[in-house]
Image (tube, helix red, strand yellow):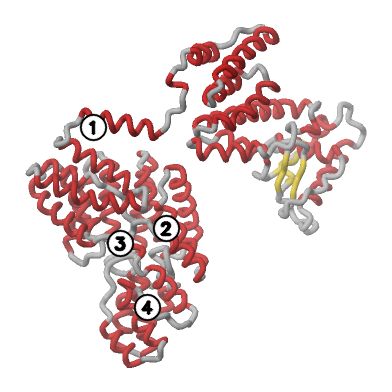
Amino acid sequence: MEFGVLGAVMAWDDDGHPVVLKGPRHRAVLARLIVARGRVVPATRLVDDLWIDPPDGALSAVRTFVAALRRALEPERTPRTPARLLVTEGPGYALRTDAVDAWRFEKAVAATLPADELLPVLTEGLALWRGPAYADFADEDWAQGERSRLNELRLRAVERQAEARLALGLAAEAVPELDAHVTEHPWREQAWRLLALALYRTGRQGDALAVLRRARSMLIDQLGVDPGAALSRLETDILNQAEHLERVSAGRVWEEAAAAYDRTVGAGARARLESTVGLLRNLAVTGGGGLEAARRHRLAAVTAAEELGDPELTARVIGAYDVPAIWTRSDDEAQAAAIVAAAERTLPTQQHPAARARLLATIALESRGSTAPRALAAAREAEKIARGLDDPGLLGFALNGVFMQTCYRAGLAAQRDAIGAELIDLSERHGLLTWEVLGHLIRLQTCSALDDFPSADHHAAAVDALATSHELPLVGVFTAWYRAMRRDTSDAYRHAATLLDGAGMPGLQEGLLPLALACHHVRRGQPVADVDYGPYDPWTRPLVLLSQDRRAQAAQALRDTPEPPPGLLLEALWCLTAHAARALDHQQSLARARAALTPAAAEHAAGSALLTLGPVADYL
């Protein structure tokens, strides 16, 4: 049930159809309860608000109005069952709902968002207005305060909408609404200022000055006050064509700052290498070509630092690239190995704990998918050092390395979940956006593995909100795949796969769609297609051959199947092995799979949050 007070007081059912609320006093009771915002309104107060001179039986009439409203608002409620919306509490009544258009509008006005996100929010909020607030009760004392408050918020929303348009370079679109706004509300100095600025930015300097003269005349003649300093200053600035009146574009700021940097910092300066790594770090989270370029230039920067023979610089260049990593297969194994080698060469030269921790975390992250004990040892040492230092960002980096090395066997989802929870808590306390995003993505994965999909849904929504607010497009790839997994249909997986095209994550993309579809078919007892499974071919090949009724070749392929590498697909790949082994009655492979999967007996083979084979227990 939705309630509306931004205009005539109304209610709408689930299908958007207006609810019949009977007479004006029924509407008055509803409106009075909405004004109370969930607080209890005593029945005697309702009597006083509804009648100037209450008649005999007024209290009974109020109860009658309430009963009629309940029937209208909850038509499917059976007799004598408690009401859920319009409830009785103590001596009065309260409306239990959050679905009021005025309250939605208030949230829109209070939003603190970048201009490109704020503009549609405000536009949608202003569209909720159908007329004056509480239009049916303009003369009622109990409605006056709320009507005035909401009207002031509406005026402010119109002005914030214009500010957003100006910030986005949409000055021409702002002019018509601002013109109507100042005509209807001539005392709003901020509105006059915005209108004049909008006109100036559309090349209408004369009209802008005319508006300011009109504002001065209106304020002096009708209100007897002089214009404020902001209006006077704007008039002077327009006459002088002050440069700051033009919209400052991000592109212009970038160009001027880059030019100043080029003039100031010499081409061979070591500072350029460190600045480059900071730039590459930001470039990496933009996705697509940015991520690929960041990988390519990162190795070049490390190589250049080593060639300068400065181990301190090399350590800083390697350690500064603390880009959060969520996927456990490398995008470029050769480059990752080169970075690890450089970090290992540099590590003995460093005594400072923070520098050592960053190098160790880098080794752990770039060794993803490795079975070498060194990678896990490096992760644990980095974490130990970071916990002894007062550097939340460094601890986030170290925890990312620990996460990457906590996929070496099945059944570790709970350990990874604890890492994700700590990253979220750490980030919320210290304002570490990228580590907060990583924490939510980790918990999205672990809650999927732990069969807690309501929590996984929460983390998907939370990380999507962060990604939208901070322009992190790669996040949407993972949440889209998660939602495809939740639907578990071929079409959903194929749609999610389109988001990987050009995303710059080959380690994630290669073979993922065919593998997801194979898992989908296995769960339904359907044949597994003979397609290119990329790196996952050894674990799907026996099932492909079984689907072709080539049992001898399938048995040989099963005997040749290696153990899955450490990673978020480890449980799923073992489940595929178990499924093929059962079909072939291959006892040795069944025993291997059972031993590997037993620690994950309570989990789902969904720890990637990208695809699922259902409960591991089904395969055990």
SS at circle 4 = helix
Residue 198: % across, % down: 55, 25
Q: Which kind of residue does numbered mark 1 sit on?
A: Asp
In the picture, the quarter occupied by the C terminus is bottom left
Q: Are marks 3 and 1 in contact (CB under 8 Å)?
A: no
CA neighbours of label 4 inside 10 A, class few (<14), some (14 to 19), many (20+): many
What's the amino acid at mark 2?
Answer: Phe
Q: Earlier in the sequence, mark 1 or mark 4?
A: 1
Q: Residues within 10 Å of mark 2 (few under 14, many from 20)?
A: many
Position of residue 115 relative to residue 290, above or below, is: above
Earlier in the chain: of badge 3 and badge 4, it is: 3
Query: Which of the two residues, 600 or 198, is positioned nearer the viewer here?
Result: 198
Q: Is residue 357 visible?
A: no
Q: Which residue lies at the image location 27% right of the left edge and 47% below the top edge?
A: 322
Residue type at mark 3: give it: Thr
Q: Which residue is mark 3?
A: 328
Residue 431 in the image: state x and y as whole percent.
Answer: 37, 39
Q: Is the C-beta separation of discs 1 and 2 under 8 Å?
A: no
Give the label, 4 or 2, closer to the camera.
2
Q: Earlier in the sequence, mark 3 or mark 1?
A: 1
Give how far apart the Cα atoms at labels 4 and 2 are: 23 Å
Q: CA distance from mark 1 to mark 4?
A: 56 Å
State the residue position of label 2.
Answer: 478
Front one among 145 and 336: 336
C-alpha span from label 3 to label 1: 38 Å
List the residue tagged with mark 1.
Answer: 262
Say if mark 1 contacts mark 4, CB within 8 Å: no
Does dot 3 land on a helix, a strand or a loop?
A: loop
Q: Residue furthest right?
A: 56
